[in-house]
Amino acid sequence: MNQREKVLMIATIVAILVYVGWQFGGVSDLFDQTAPTSAEVEDLENEWNQRKSELIDAPRVTIEYRDMIGEEREDVGPNGERLRPDLRFQQEVASWARKHGFPSPNISKDIEDIRDVEEYQLVLVTLDFREASFRQVADLMKEFDQRGLIFEEVELRSSRRAGTLGGRITVARLVEAFYQTRRRRLAGWEPPA
């Protein structure tokens, strides 16, 4: 027997052994036990789709949760206490932004003293956004203007491909002095009770 015939004979014997083992030796049962059934595959697919929809709905769920516990109410905090003017203003800007199509706005605030004015301070709220339509930005700026807010800074960037805007809008509101800034602390000013 030459080399070629030996290889063919070994391959034929291996094929016969696999066939006999598959038919009579229970090898097929072993594979059937480890393979997932169609019901298991369907259950896993349903679970995957449910988890995916939960991730997609996360911003909406967060907003509903905040509404449920009362964080978005203008004058009252979660425990029923009256909100400070800066927090109330921050919440108002957030609700106006959501009203005009900014689903989860990135908002920060700051408090500044007014030079030579002791009775009042400025509360500055900055809205950062990555993508919004021209209409959304215009409507939001109209809302700010109608509310009598002071535009401190407006920085807009356009995307030529998408036809959208990104940027930062900082608005301010004049409030009675309530916060002890560093300058006020050094001057010995005490916040009202």
Image (cartoon, helix red, strand yellow):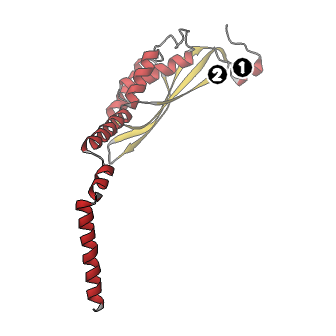
Q: Residue at x 35, y 29 (%)?
A: 101
Position of 172 with respect to 96 (left or right) is right
The answer to whether residue 141 is seen in the rendering is no
Q: Residue at x 27, y 88 (%)?
A: 4
Disc ID at residue 113: 2
x and y percent of residue 164 in the render? Answer: 35, 40
Mark 2 residue type? Asp
Q: For the view shown, which residue lies furthest in the front direction?
A: 24
Disc ID at residue 184: 1
- Examine the rendered structure and indicate whether residue 168 appears above or below residue 31: above
Front position in the image: 107 or 2? 2
**Secondary structure type for disc 1:** helix
x and y percent of residue 142 in the render? Answer: 38, 24
- Examine the rendered structure and indicate whether residue 36 appears above or below residue 148: below
**Secondary structure type for disc 2:** strand
Q: Residue at x 46, y 16 (%)?
A: 69
Answer whether labels 2 and 1 touch (C-beta < 8 Å).
Answer: yes
Front position in the image: 13 or 71? 13
x and y percent of residue 40 in the render? Answer: 29, 41
The answer to whether residue 51 is seen in the rendering is yes
